[in-house]
Amino acid sequence: MPLRVDGDPGYGSVTAGAAPVPSGSPGGSETVPLLIPDTEPPERSLSGPLSKEELEEVAGTPWWRKLRARLVLLFWLGWLALLCGAVAIIATSPRPIAPPLQWWQRALFYRMQPALLLSAHGDGPGGINGVRDRLPYLESLGVGALVLEGLFPQDSAPSDLMQFNETLGTLAQFQQLVTEGHSAGMKILLDLCNLDLSDGPAETSGPVQNALQFWLEQGVAGFGICDTDVAYSEQTLQEWRALVQDYNQEDNERILMVRQVWQAASEPGVPSAVVNSSLVHLLIQSLLPSSPRPLTSLEVAVAVETVLLMPQRQWPSWTMGGAVSWELQRMLMILSMTLPGTPVINYGEEISHSQNASTNASSRHREALIDIADDFVPNDKKARRTALALFHSLSHSRSREEVLLFGNFTFLPFANSSSSSSPAVFTNSSSAASPSSPAPGLLAFLRSWGCVHLLVLFNLGPDPQELDPSWAPSLPTGGVYVTSTGLDRVGALSLTTLTVNPQEAMVIKLFEGGSYS
């Protein structure tokens, strides 16, 4: 078949009779193109990742800048929506409303006799100056009110109450104590218990009123009286209450305290006289009755259970009371610091000073005490440090945990509880308890405020006690230790596997379903 030469000369042909001209020569033209197909590069797969060069090329394009701005806007709108939702949930959730509390309801009270600070060796500061030197220590304990006892001789006449025992210091030193106490956030109060103010109503009212007014003008925040004092009466309370009210300030209310005294051989919880609580601010009651001998574990268990079963007053106040061993004293410290109301601590109890636990019994016992640091032998130093650390833990918890200030109180009985039996009667005999008396065992109560629950457990018996899982089925089973008498319990726990050791007390914060509250 002959080759066709009259076709299109632009592809695969040459001009007849003409010599080929090299490409690119002058006057020449390329009449034979390269045989390379004119094809486009393959398209990039949209499913694969972009390379670094492609990212740099795309990042600067207008559509990407718009997309990025919209994504940032969408993120912040979502975050604001979550925040608004959280705020709405918190605002609409039911919350307990904390009632306003006065300073004497929030404060930790500490009772001290300046005479006990007088050095037995005649060296070092004592009396009022000794109290001043201990203000930093008391402040570290969280003390908010210092009650001074024994400033006046017991045979003082009502007209002599404007000056205290000269061996304790001067009025100028007392005024300095009040000033330094206020700087440390500490109120100074005077205890007038065991003073003979009863020379006759007509003769007594005027001098006593003048003396109280004098000390109020010195900055004293209030006064205390015992319900066993001869001068104690409803009329006395009315007169004293009216006087302290005249010196009230908005941020400095002056108060009146009454200390109830348990008579030996009286039933626990039965005071020696009925007090009109509307006339006093603080009605201080002992957890234990006074006794000339240390109380047994059974007696302490019955007394504590009786206190826990008592109807709660509007604002109670507790002090420790009778003499007990240092192990039981630590348990009672946890009790007094976790019960509703205002705790009143006696001098030395923060380090489990066993002798000082009997300060409620009589002034003779208190006068026999000297500086607590000298009363401890070297073998007790570790026990003292542990007791002091426990007190710091309790004081810190009370100031931090609202549940201990505002929380409801619920007594939680156990199967071995003696609440169904009649209360034991405390006598001066040395016998411990009748054979029919129940053995001391577990005691517990719950403090609740909103979603926060604190469980307080005591084992006053000689044997370890395991919690029965069916004991309180409505309680959360999980929790975390807040503190314990030995300070050896930390971290999370389960009530279903908890064992309380003999003469051990602990505070547990409960939480639901594996989450801390």
Image (cartoon, rainbow, N blue to C red):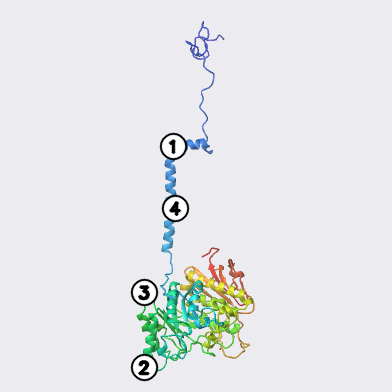
Look at label 3 and name its amino acid.
Glu
Expressed as whole percent of the image width and height from the top left, the position of residue 134 reads 50, 75
Question: Mark 2 belongs to which amino acid?
Answer: Ala
Q: Earlier in the sequence, mark 3 or mark 2?
A: 2
Circle 4 — which element?
helix
* Front-most of residues 445 and 476: 445
Disc 1: CA contacts within 10 A as few (<14), some (14-19) or many (>=20): few
Circle 2 SS class: helix
438 in relation to 76, above or below:
below
Residue at image mark 2? 202
Give the SS element for disc 3. loop
Q: Residues within 10 Å of mark 2 (few under 14, many from 20)?
A: few
**Inter-mark Cα distance, 1 to 2:** 101 Å
Q: Residue beneath label 1, please? A: 61
Which is more N-terminal, label 3 or label 1?
1
**Mark 3 lies on residue:** 250
> Which comes sooner in the sequence, label 1 or label 2?
1
Q: Earlier in the sequence, mark 4 or mark 1?
A: 1
